[in-house]
Image (cartoon, helix red, strand yellow):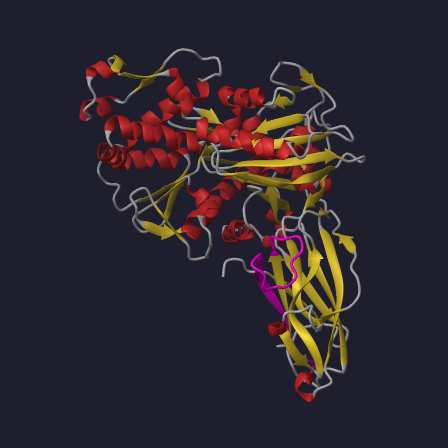
Amino acid sequence: MADVDMHGGNHLDSVPHQDKKIVAAIDFGTTYSGYAFTFRTEFDKSDGARQIFTNRWSNSGSLLSAKAPTTALFDPEYKFHSFGYEAEEKYAELVDTKQYKDWHCFRRFKMQLHNTVRLKREMEIKDETGQTFCAKQVFTESIRYLRDKLLKEIETRNPMKIIDIHWVLTVPAIWTEPAKQFMHEAAIEAGIPPEAQQIALEPEAAAVYCRSLQDGTLVDSKYQKVTGAFRSGRSYMIVDMGGGTVDMVVHKVAEDGRLVEIWQASGGPWGGVTVDQTFYDFVVKTFGKEFIEKFRNERAKEWMKLEIEFETQKRKLKFDTNYDIKLELPARLIAESNLEVADLTSYNKLGIENDEFKKFFQPSTEDTVAHIKSILTELSEVDLILLVGGFATSKYVSRVIADAFPDKRVVVPLQAEVAVMYGAVLFGFEPLVISSRVCRHTYGIRMQSKFIEGHHPPEYKAVVDGETMCRNIFSVLATKGEMMEMMATRSETYSSTHREESRRFSRMGCDVYASTSTSPRYTTDESCVRLGCINIEPPANGWPENVNYNLKMFFGQTEFKVTMKNDVTELECSSSFDFLG
């Protein structure tokens, strides 16, 4: 296989926006998931009059919410049984009646895509009892359940053909390309056509939601109205605080009202589940690890009661709460543990000192505040911080962040817990509302150029078609940190020579690379990773002496895509890269 040589320059194109009759968004979260949709006729209304539809989920206690727990249950034959509250309650019932061991319950499994360094299609995850199971099947069936439920609801409101629906899937902005591809493929297997599918980054979707709110509805932590938040020239930070991750992005509002990313999306695994994990560590310390692990596995219904009680107390906590927290314990936990009566504040409540309870939040809030500070040190013009996501609705968390930035206006918008879900619907109708993003990597291809003694490494020296060349040159098409227009295309012209007979029938190869460096020199640099290759077959009568190629690299689409066209056969070869090899 032969390399190509660089020649010429590049330019930008953009992909036109297409109309959709209906947009449906699936917000697949770590702790809770849901869906929302609306019709073009609703979207065309003014912001205040527009209606976005969603399901109202309920458990046996008649709790109504816009999302359901991200819990999937499979039966002993590995067939999908249920999702959400239904799955949680069924599994608790199975545990109670000692019939759970052959069943497979998965909770909060989305974080596996963030925590796994090298994702594979065959990746396995563990259920509640430690048994391994195909991860793709769990994700696919969960998405299929949400898809089918959504379609039924659309049918009741306004029957439409499935081809009229444009689908949006939300993912954390800090996810890798393999994680995004995993979700994309799971959605395809769940019955969502790839051509009707779009990925939305969660903080961007939340920004689109906040932008749609009527001016004056945003109120900061000092109860002052925030006006002109999305006027031209204004900069703001969105902090999406979900169950698993905390994602941040910084935008500036352009003259045309569109949003320009001025700091690349970043964040970490600091969401609400970190508080739950710290609480779990406290419970283990109080009751003993062996006892709690056994109780959790064999008394699922009682354990769920404890989790719900903690969630209730967690949400009630405010920054100025100065009393000790009284946590109601399940009767069986008291009866079966070695807890002394003296440890209880009343017959069934465990007292937790106020400062101790607030420490449950400390790992998350400290990491979040430190990361916000690191960004604002570089972007002093940002004076508005918008907190969205379920974790942001905690009065305690939002106050901690507000107090850490007294010179900034910190806002938790109305319905912050569904900001991403609602924003994803709006984003589906107008994806170009995000004008440009900061490129997260440097992208380019491996090529060869004339060897220069003393400049190029001698080990890369090779004679190609009678000329002394340097192999493994990184030819840059897009640089980390530069502004990249949404749906943009980078184009570059390359050439190859075929004077020698052995090269006339060579298959030409174009290896595509990404780098974490802004200025990689060679594709062998430690910062570089090979994404894939485009292969170009020679014509039947062989290549002429000189061949020119036009390479295009597409950004901002669901899949990272590269095409290459030569001026001899005029065939366009393309590759949508496989990050899950």
Name the spot of residue 250 as percent of width and height, x first. 66, 35
Quarter of the image with the N terminus is bottom right
Q: Is residue 386 visible?
A: yes
Name the spot of residue 239 as percent of width and height, x first. 59, 32
Against 359, is 323 above or below? above
Against 541, is 448 above or below? above
For residue 157: magenta? no
The segment highlighted magenta reads 515-539
Against 179, is 284 above or below? above
Quarter residue 384 falls in: top right
Residue at position x 65%, y 54% in the image: 442
Name the spot of residue 221 as percent of width and height, x first. 60, 17
Residue at position x 37%, y 13% in the image: 324
Against 553, is 166 above or below? above
Is residue 36 toward the left or the right of residue 3 in the image? left
Of 91 and 535, nearer the camera is 535
For residue 528: magenta? yes
Quarter residue 509 falls in: bottom right
Name the spot of residue 54 as percent of width and height, x first. 55, 32
Q: In the current view of this chain or complex, which residue is farthest to the front? A: 454
Of 380 and 539, nearer the camera is 380
